[in-house]
Amino acid sequence: MEFGVSFYLIVGPGTMKPSAYFASAFELATIADREGMASVKMTEHYLNPYGGYCPSPLSFLAAVAARTRRVRLITGCILPAFHHPIQIAAETADGGRD
């Protein structure tokens, strides 16, 4: 059985500042990688604190990739209405990370 970290929080400016949220999220992702968890997942959300502060899961996961070595990176959702299909393909292409 594999375990991972899924960032799908109900948090907004009244609960936590964005800088504190991302600092905590990056720290948890680093701990998950170090402790052998299988994945880190982020979902795209807009206009609502439901789901956390993440209008760009690919940018978030790129920052996680820079801090981790083996954990798999997963998007819970990318909203295609907000992105060109070629942009999604280019940004999600496997760059050979082992």
Image: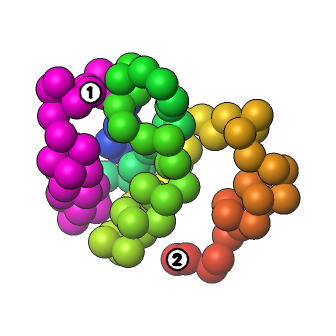
Which x, y percent locates residue 80?
75, 38
Viewer-side label of 1, 2: 1
Left or right: where 18 falls relative to 45: left
Instruction: Mark 1 or mark 2: name the one nearer the start of the chain.
Output: 1
- In the rendered image of this protein, does residue 13 appear above or below residue 84? above
Mark number, residue 29: none
- In the rendered image of this protein, does residue 54 appear above or below residue 34? above
> SS for tag 2?
loop
Q: Residue flagged by tag 1: what amino acid is it?
A: Gly
Extent of the magenta region: 9-35
Which x, y percent locates residue 34?
21, 65
Left or right: where 35 falls relative to 4: left
Left or right: where 71 falls relative to 46: left
Q: Nearer the viewer, residue 52 or 64?
A: 52
The 10 Å Cα crowd at callout 1, few under 14, some 14 to 19, many 20 or more, is some
Q: Nearer the viewer, residue 56 or 39?
A: 56
Q: What is the magenta segment's predominant secondary structure?
A: helix
Q: Residue flagged by tag 2: what amino acid is it?
A: Asp
**Residue 70, visible in the rendered structure:** no
- In the rendered image of this protein, does residue 77 appear above or below residue 14? below
> SS for tag 1?
loop
To which residue does mark 2 refer? Answer: 98
Report if residue 16 lies within the magenta region.
Answer: yes
Task: Give the quarter of the image for residue 69.
Answer: bottom left
Q: Nearer the viewer, residue 65 or 49?
A: 49
- How far apart marks 1 and 2 lie (CA) works out to 35 Å
Which x, y percent locates residue 30?
23, 62
